[in-house]
Image (tube, rainbow, N blue to C red):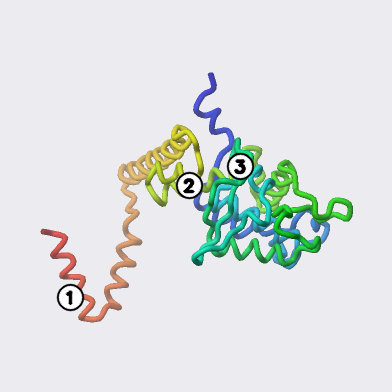
């Protein structure tokens, strides 16, 4: 029987890591690896760079699987009521039947990529295609997408065997749980058929809280005051307040004591 640790072999990104990844993941696609980007980021002026950026955003914000990226067609995109949706071919499904809302910035990145395409796509064309001379316009394979995202992570400085393209989806689930605090809502967002699959994010949240308690106990035992910086910042903010703002603050403090 596999242990809980085994089930979590593919680890997710911590919040600070995902911020760093956002800054660095925009490095050049493998097709342009021979040309150095002096800015240290992917040049989104190229079709390859725009394609990788759109795929990255769909995994880390919408929680798409690589198979879902590979299956998607252009006609699966829909704009309605000021929102953009992508109909997803979910795990074990034979057609795109799951409507997934995506952030406006993600929709913009996808459109930016589509406008750069050189294969004259139609609605029935794959959403993500190869760009080579022989394979241009053909649907990207799941393994190819996984490799592209993995190389982007490596180029961004995340070269662990435990970090894969699926780690980006796992990160979306973890952060969705942290933001909502709602297991059912996270389950729906990640499209887990079994709530037990979503419960892994509860364990991760518990581990982070335990680590925080351990650190706070260490600080307590060793007389480390981690609140001093916060107090100094508060005192500086109070100095900048107007008399009216100070009165409102005092009223709020009195109300909190009741």
Query: Residue 141 appears at what percent x and percent y?
Result: 74, 44
Q: Give the residue drawn at x 65%, y 64%.
A: 111
Closest to the camera, between mark 3 and mark 1, is: 3
Which residue in the structure is indicated by mark 2? Answer: 189
- Is label 3 in a helix, a strand or a loop? helix
Query: Residue 86 appears at what percent x and percent y?
Result: 58, 54
Closest to the camera, between mark 1 and mark 2, is: 2
Looking at the figure, which quarter contains the C terminus? bottom left
At label 1, counting other C-alpha atoms closer than 10 Å, the crowd grade (few under 14, some 14-19, many 20 or more) is: few
- Residue extending farthest left: 258
Which residue in the structure is indicated by mark 1? Answer: 247
Q: Give the residue drawn at x 55%, y 51%.
A: 62
Pick whichever of labels 3 and 1 is earlier in the sequence: 3
Query: Residue 53 appears at what percent x and percent y?
Result: 66, 58
The tag on residue 102 is: none
At label 2, counting other C-alpha atoms closer than 10 Å, the crowd grade (few under 14, some 14-19, many 20 or more) is: some
Which residue in the structure is indicated by mark 3? Answer: 166
Pick whichever of labels 2 and 3 is earlier in the sequence: 3
């Amino acid at each position: 029987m596999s242990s809980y640790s085994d089930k979590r072999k593919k680890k997710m990104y911590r919040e600070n890591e995902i911020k760093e990844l956002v800054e660095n993941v925009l490095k050049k696609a493998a097709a342009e690896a021979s040309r150095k980007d002096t800015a240290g980021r992917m040049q989104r002026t190229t079709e390859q760079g725009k394609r990788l950026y759109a795929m990255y955003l769909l995994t880390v914000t919408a929680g798409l699987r690589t198979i879902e990226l590979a299956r998607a067609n252009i006609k699966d995109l829909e704009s309605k009521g000021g929102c953009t949706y992508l109909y997803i071919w979910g795990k074990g499904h034979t057609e795109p039947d799951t409507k997934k809302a995506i952030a406006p910035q993600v929709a913009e990145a996808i459109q930016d990529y589509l406008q750069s395409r050189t294969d004259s796509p139609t609605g029935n064309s794959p959403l993500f295609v190869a760009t080579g001379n022989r394979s241009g316009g053909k649907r990207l394979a799941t393994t190819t997408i996984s490799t592209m995202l993995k190389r982007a992570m490596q180029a961004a400085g995340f070269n662990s065997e435990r970090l894969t393209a699926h780690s980006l989806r796992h990160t979306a689930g973890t952060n969705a749980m942290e933001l909502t605090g709602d297991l059912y809502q996270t389950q729906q967002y990640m499209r887990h058929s079994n709530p037990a699959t979503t419960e892994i994010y509860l364990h991760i949240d518990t581990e982070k809280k335990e680590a925080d308690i351990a650190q706070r106990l260490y600080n307590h035992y060793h007389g480390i005051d981690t609140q001093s910086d916060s107090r100094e910042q508060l005192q500086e903010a109070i100095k900048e307040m107007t008399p009216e703002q100070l009165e409102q603050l005092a009223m709020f403090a009195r109300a909190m004591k009741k």
